Image (cartoon, rainbow, N blue to C red):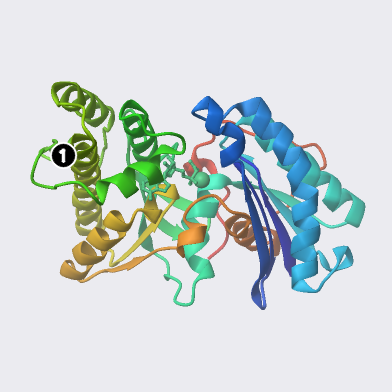
Amino acid sequence: MRVIGLETSCDETGVAFYDTERGLLAHALYSQVSLHEDYGGVVPELASRDHVRKTLPLLKQVLSEAGLNRADIDGVAYTAGPGLIGALLVGAAIGRSLAWALGVPAVGVHHMEGHLLAPMLEKNPPAFPFVALLVSGGHTQLMRVDGVGRYTLLGDTLDDAAGEAFDKTAKLLGLGYPGGPALARLAERGDPARFHFPRPMTNRPGLEFSFSGLKTFALTTWQASAGDEQARADIARAFEDAVVDTLAIKCRRALEQTGLVRLVVAGGVSANVGLRTRLQEEAARAGATVYYPRLEFCTDNGAMIAYAGAQRLRAGQAEPLAFTAWPRWPLTELTPLPA
Ligand code: KG4
Ligand code: ZN
């Protein structure tokens, strides 16, 4: 079964073509970074309009790269939430219309299910069950994953998501949008011994996270400093180390608590090199294996949506013509697929 995946939940337009027999056939991504840069963050209405402009050209590109045409599409998957409602509706409307015109089924995919299943596109995919650490701009969650749609929430953030904390801290340090990758780059030049930031919620039991205090800690440290370049880099390093350490401690705890030996790390923050290295070491010590998507599939992309949608369409899931999108949507409410 060959499935087109459309991702339009935020500031990237992603399109991919996935074949359940042959794997990923082609994928394309358009980032809106230059569009939102001047505003210091994503402007929802501009994002929606740009998805309108880019989705069909990317679809054509992907079909031509795969050496196939529209008649070869057996199903359509689009991100139905969570995300920016206008942006989501663009993908949903295009996806539904395409499926209707071709007479094929369509399915709305949960954006975080896409992230969570992205490592399945790699050569050595993890087997179920596993623990998943989902770290993106909107989510920081630990999940027990027993199959597609079989998710048990183990821990969540009480305030900011990890990516959001990266973005907000980057902003207060005067780094532009998108902040996470900029802060990570700056942290490479920082002295890890100069400042020590707390590891929130690690000295009590449980798998909950809280990152908003780290941002305040960064602000007060920045204000007390001379405001020079080295202080900026040292604070970036201390902040990154604190987030990475906190995530690693909770991952180790989740593996111990569940007795599972596989850890999947996905979502935009899983592109962070410090986090990848640290979790690799942590997992090795615990006798566990860690699985990541390739770097380009850590952040938003169409391939993960095509993959997740293909699993659901292949299992017979498809929805009626009327469509909707959900700006908020708990992952634990999805339909479980038979094992
Ligand atoms: O998954 P994603 O592309 O979009 C959402 O679903 O939110 O994640 C974006 C988030 C942003 O907060 C961004 O700052 C963060 O991932 N991010 C990073 C890195 N690359 C992206 N954070 C830290 N280090 C990175 N290298
Ligand atoms: Zn995402």
Q: In this rendering, would 232 be left or right of 317?
A: left
Work out whether 285 lies above or below 320: below
Displayed quadrant of residue 90: top right
Q: Is residue 328 visible?
A: no
Which residue is the site of mark 1? 199
Q: Is mark 1 within 8 Å of ligand 1?
A: no
Between 288 and 55, the residue placed more toward the observer is 55
Displayed quadrant of residue 129: bottom left
Q: Position of residue 238 (x, y in %)?
A: 18, 41
Residue drawn at x 26%, y 52% as measured from the top left: 188
Between 119 and 183, the residue placed more toward the observer is 183
| Total marks placed | 1
Q: Position of residue 118 (x, y in %)?
A: 51, 60
Q: Position of residue 309 (x, y in %)?
A: 65, 56
Q: In this rendering, would 229 be left or right of 82?
A: left
Q: Badge 1, how many Cα within 10 Å: few under 14, some, many 20+? A: many
Work out whether 106 lies above or below 182: below
Between 292 and 185, the residue placed more toward the observer is 185
Displayed quadrant of residue 224: top left
Q: In this rendering, would 160 be left or right of 244?
A: right
Residue drawn at x 14%, y 36% as measured from the top left: 197
Residue drawn at x 18%, y 22% as measured from the top left: 220
Q: Is residue 233 visible?
A: yes
Q: In this rendering, would 255 be left or right of 64?
A: left
Identified by mark 1, the residue type is: Arg
From the image, which quarter does the N terminus lie in? bottom right
Residue drawn at x 40%, y 55% as measured from the top left: 271
